[in-house]
Image (cartoon, rainbow, N blue to C red):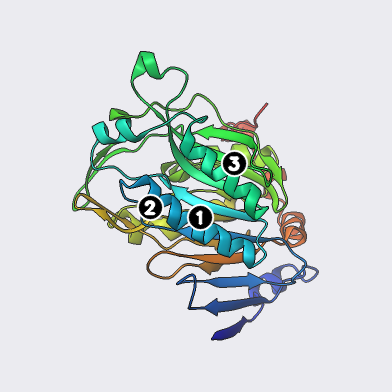
Amino acid sequence: MLGFITRPPHRFLSLLCPGLRIPQLSVLCAQPRPRAMAISSSSCELPLVAVCQVTSTPDKQQNFKTCAELVREAARLGACLAFLPEAFDFIARDPAETLHLSEPLGGKFLEEYTQLARECGLWLSLGGFHERGQDWEQTQKIYNCHVLLNSKGAVVATYRKTHLCDVEIPGQGPMCESNSTMPGPSLESPVSTPAGKIGLAVCYDMRFPELSLALAQAGAEILTYPSAFGSITGPAHWEVLLRARAIETQCYVVAAAQCGRHHEKRASYGHSMVVDPWGTVVARCSEGPGLCLARIDLNYLRQLRRHLPVFQHRRPDLYGNLGHPLS
């Protein structure tokens, strides 16, 4: 059973910028499979992206089975690109298990995803792969690696998470990512995809606007934050941060999230979503594993940037260049 909801245009934006075309946002919700789905679109000709929400466990093969089912459903529904969350491969119980389960990029596990991309004919954003890098033998630590595959299964970009989550939140339990993970050395230039130019980041990176500004100034039209937010920070900060990153960069923001209880030691907040450049949440997942779908309207993005040219109004002479453009 399908239900349609049509949202009214942004009246305030229309008043502020009379010449700006605001697309109607129609939302399609379907229940049977996957469990949570919503489409936000202005035209069926616009590229469609899928945002997958899962509950990873230490069982890598079961995790792949779950992700593959969602990716195949995304392809069936016409998506050109599917986003998977941080730790889509597994969420271990402790650092020792994390290191034990990790693999190099050329390992068997990632090969299953390259085959999946070819089979489905769509791009895959693999939000946070536990990667044994070339320095594994020396460091015995891994990288939290965001991998982008094209529809032929080729790796077109890799970004290794630069901001590691070493925090202690009352009620949520301590997290020290650096116990098992090395910080990435650099940002990745935005990558052209069928949906637009994508800037890669991972989870905790969203707390650092310098990164998103650097990606936007380098040409990003879509920022992606695959994540595994906790139960305390999630309700307080998740949506606020994502909407802020969208507004300040005038980019779409796509955030695939882990949800639910992974094992006895860890649970995640969920609430995967897509935010448009005006800061409106145009698609979101409900509770539990599933996916949501959104259309990416780059003409709308360009119109908004013309009417609110914030990047032209910056004053680096007063406060420096926050987020230096990528070379």
If the image is split into quadrants, where does the N terminus sit?
A: bottom right
Q: Residues within 10 Å of mark 2 (few under 14, many from 20)?
A: some
Which image quadrant for residue 277? bottom right
Q: Earlier in the sequence, mark 1 or mark 2?
A: 2
Which image quadrant for residue 157? top right
User: Dot 2 lies on which element?
Assistant: helix
The residue located at (46%, 60%) in the rendering is 272
Image spot of residue 274 (x, y percent): 55, 61
What residue is shown with label 3? 148
Circle 1: residue type: Ala
Q: Which mark is residue 62?
A: 2
What residue is shown with label 1? 68
Q: Is residue 286 above or below residue 155?
A: below
146 on left or right of 7: left
Circle 3: residue type: Leu
Circle 2: residue type: Gln
Work out how far the residue at label 1 is from the one at label 3, CA to CA, in angstroms. 16 Å
User: Residues at badges 1 and 3 in contact (C-beta under 8 Å)?
Assistant: no
The residue located at (65%, 32%) in the rendering is 325
Work out how far the residue at label 3 is from the one at label 2, CA to CA, in angstroms. 22 Å
